[in-house]
Image (cartoon, rainbow, N blue to C red):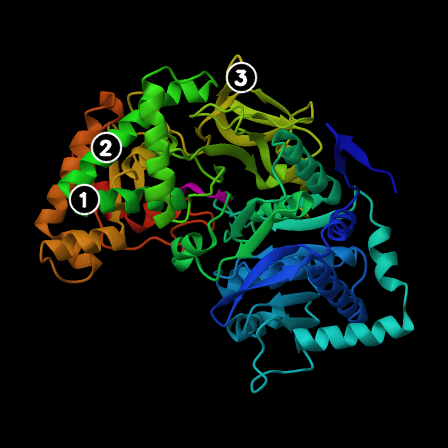
Amino acid sequence: MTEEAIQGNTVFPSIPAMFQARMRDHAAFALMLKKEHGAWRAYTGQHMSVSVRRWTLGLLALGVKKGDKVAVLSKTRMEWALADLAILHCGAVTVGIYPQLPADDVAYQLAHSEAKIVFCEDQAQLAKVLSIRDKTKLEYAVVFDHDPENQDYSFAIPGDDLEMRGSTHEKFNPDSFDKAWQELKKDDLATIIYTSGTTGPPKGALLTHGNLTFVIAAVAAAIPGHGQGDFGVAFLPMAHALQRVGNYVGMYNGIRGAFAPAVETLIDDFKELRPTVQVSVPRIWEKLYAKIQAGLETASFARRAVFRSMLAAGRASAPYRKTGKPVPFPLSVRWSVARKFFRGVVWPKLGFDRVRFLSSGGAPIGMELLEFFYAMDVLIIEAWGLTETAAPATLNTPDNFKFGTVGRALPGVEVKVAPDGELLVRGPGVFKGYYKDEEATRAAFDEQGFFRTGDIGEIDADGFVKITDRKKNLIVTSLGKKVPPQNLENVFKTCPFLGPCLIHGDRRKFLSAIFTLDKEEIGAWAKARRITGDLAAIAAHDETKKLVSQAVERINGGLANYEQVKRWAVVGDEWTDRTGELTPTLKVKRKVLEERYRPILDAFYEGE
């Protein structure tokens, strides 16, 4: 079993090989925390190793063989990670399915992948599977939270029962566990991750063990010192490449982690757990920014004055700190006081007083947020990648970053710009193709083997990559002006009372927008003004429209004429991944929203 290295970091031949080596290193180390009965319980490397072994043997007892497909239909939780590792130790292939998907979409992915077994989170997910079982090739379902009063044990197996079957299997096949995972090579398939399918049925991206282990080692090489002593919270969907690879990197580096019970309680979990490093998508940092801004609105005049004075010192010192230059006197004294204020007064209330750095991926983040947090002594570094690149292909680091960019290519990765501005990627982390779709696979690569990412961008003289927008999302007005909508949407999301928004205007003379409201922040604002009713009633109120109008006018003032939003509407709807308006990584689904609000959008351009 040969092993390679990237700048001294081992590239293991498979995820199980990495897991086994790292769990031996951290056998007594409390690596994972899970909330049980209101308290956090720690699981050591030894505990995880035992659980993975038992679950692997249970799957082998059910007849799982190398290359078989096994699905996981659950929200992010410790059992998701254990199931994934057990599947991979069998030599099988993990198929992650988003739990919020409707039954028909689940049926498509189970059938298309030819999954033999599915891990279900609870009775609700099992019921979904039972309703479409006849459309699949499923033989068993394993249920994390099983209901003993309402379960078909011939098909649906509790997790405890899976372990018992594994114990029996091991008695007659004592070498089966080690034999299964030790046979794996880097070119063996590890997972099928289905893309969002915004332009048709979801495509299953094929990622090998070598794709994943290369990216893990490359990230470790790019961020030296990222490891033991660090702590982070897992809450993004494990069915997505970003959180899955983030978990693997945590195992590789010995980072302690906790599984958040729900996104709705995430800020409270941060306050309790106090992470030192944290992977997220921009929407979480946008909500944290909104929370700080809302707190300032209700603070006394004196407290606001102190905060703004400290923030000014942070902003003034930022250019020196970004380049590693000494902050000149007397600004250095002001910055020293400001840093103590933020770390000792502000961040403890939010659980970020121990943070070394935060990371953001999955979608662009606004420059205002990056500068604001950095002025408060918290660095957010952006990374960029896709499912097809096994998550990050480029990365800013704490020691080498540029705001407004997604960093430089990982060691061993090539990134270049095509003549039409599309970013192309080549390297060991790039996927092998789409499952059962040779035509889409051929179209995904150019003649030199570079993957066509679909993102428009540029690369500066220092090698830092800047993303403009998705190629298919770029708005071209009827006057020929090109506008990347995500950049504008990010600007509007810095308004604390606004939620996700949609910028529209392709082949039109001007831009328009659909705005939503942040339920928590607008609720507090409305209550203070005695505006009653649900979110729809608040959205329809004249005072709310006036508030939004003022924000649009302010933001338009800093934009070129062709970038300005000329017509807009504020709606009383909540856009979520559960209700289908947002992707699992909380990006807007443009086609879905444009169809839903077609009458409003068309009315903007009547008589155009």
Residue 136 can be seen in this image:
no
Q: Which label number is shown at residue 308?
A: 2
Badge 2 or badge 3: first in the primary sequence: 2
Give the side of residue 552 with respect to residue 66, left or right: left
The image shows residue 218 at horizontal and vertical percentages of 67, 33
Which mark is on residue 447? none
On screen, residue 322 versus residue 67, left or right, reads left
Dot 3 falls on a residue whose secondary structure is: loop
Residue nearest the viewer, comparing 235 with 587: 235
What is the three-letter code of the residue carrying label 1?
Answer: Glu
Give the percent coordinates (x, y) of residue 414: 64, 23
Count neighbours of disc 2 (C-alpha within 10 A) and say few if under 14, some if 14 to 19, many if 20 or more. few
Mark 3 vs mark 1: give the one in front.
1
Viewer-closest of 309 and 122: 309
Identify the residue under disc 3.
419
Q: Is residue 171 above or below residue 243?
A: below
Sequence order check: which comes first, mark 2 or mark 1?
1
Of residues 572 and 309, which is closer to you in this image? Answer: 309
- Compared to residue 96, the image places residue 381 above or below, namely above
Amino acid found under the numbered disc labelled 2: Arg
Label 3, residues with CA under 10 Å away: few <14, some 14-19, many ≥20: few
| Residue stretch rendered in magenta on the structure | 278-282
Q: Is residue 284 magenta?
A: no
Q: Per the image, is 279 magenta?
A: yes
Q: Residues within 10 Å of mark 1 (few under 14, many from 20)?
A: few
Rounded to the nearest angstrom, the CA distance separating label 2 from label 3 is 45 Å
